[in-house]
Image (tube, rainbow, N blue to C red):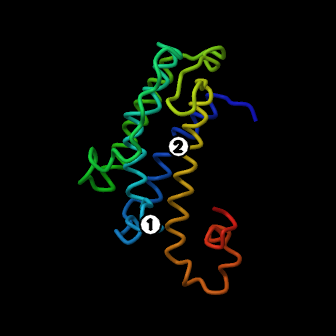
Amino acid sequence: MSFAIAQAREILQATPGVLQALLSGLSDAWLDANEGPNTWSPREVVAHLADLEEQDWMVRARIILDQGESLPFPPVNRERFRHTLAGNTTAQLLDLFAQRRAQNLKTLDQLALKPADLNRKGKHPALGPVTLQQLLATWVVHDFTHLGQIVRVMACRYAQTVGPWADYLGILSWRKGENV
């Protein structure tokens, strides 16, 4: 499938509302569930998403457009949210994510990208040359990755209690090593 900014934007715009609908008003038992040591809870995923809206996507898009490959992207601290957003409630994190995402989408619109812009390159510190199209597509898939992660973590709270239906619930199949 070919990349289209308008279609990517649909997902990027929808993600905050999806998270709001899924997580608002839930108890801490749901929001703090995780898959074990060194894994993230739904609340932590939202904090991570809110934090990356500030330090990743648009920062890197601007570097590609303004500096190209001459200025490598600054490294992203995936765990920075633990310090910068500590103490925020889930409601505050959801609101912050929605605000930051809306601002980034406004900025994206203001860039008025042309098809040729999507082929412009930047330099990732670990991956080397990457295009703006790849960065924007990754932004979308990153949303899907974390939406899937949140749903999986929440579903697995009941993995041991669904009984014989477990074999029919694909979201639980990762526990058997089928879908890691």
Front residue of 120 and 31: 120
Image location of residue 140, percent across then percent down: 57, 39
For the C terminus, which image quadrant? bottom right
Q: For residue 2, which quarter of the picture?
A: top right
Image location of residue 172, percent across then percent down: 62, 71
Residue drawn at point x = 44 percent, y = 23 percent: 107
Residue on which the image places disc 2: 14
For the N terminus, which image quadrant? top right
Q: Which residue of the protein is positioned furthest toward the right in this rendering?
A: 1
Position above or below: 121 against 157: above
Counting other residues with Cα less than 10 Å from the Cα at mark 1, is it few (<14), some (14-19), or many (20 or more)? many
Element at badge 1? loop
Element at badge 2? helix
Image location of residue 43, percent across then percent down: 38, 58
Report the amino acid beneath label 2: Ala
Residue on which the image places disc 1: 34
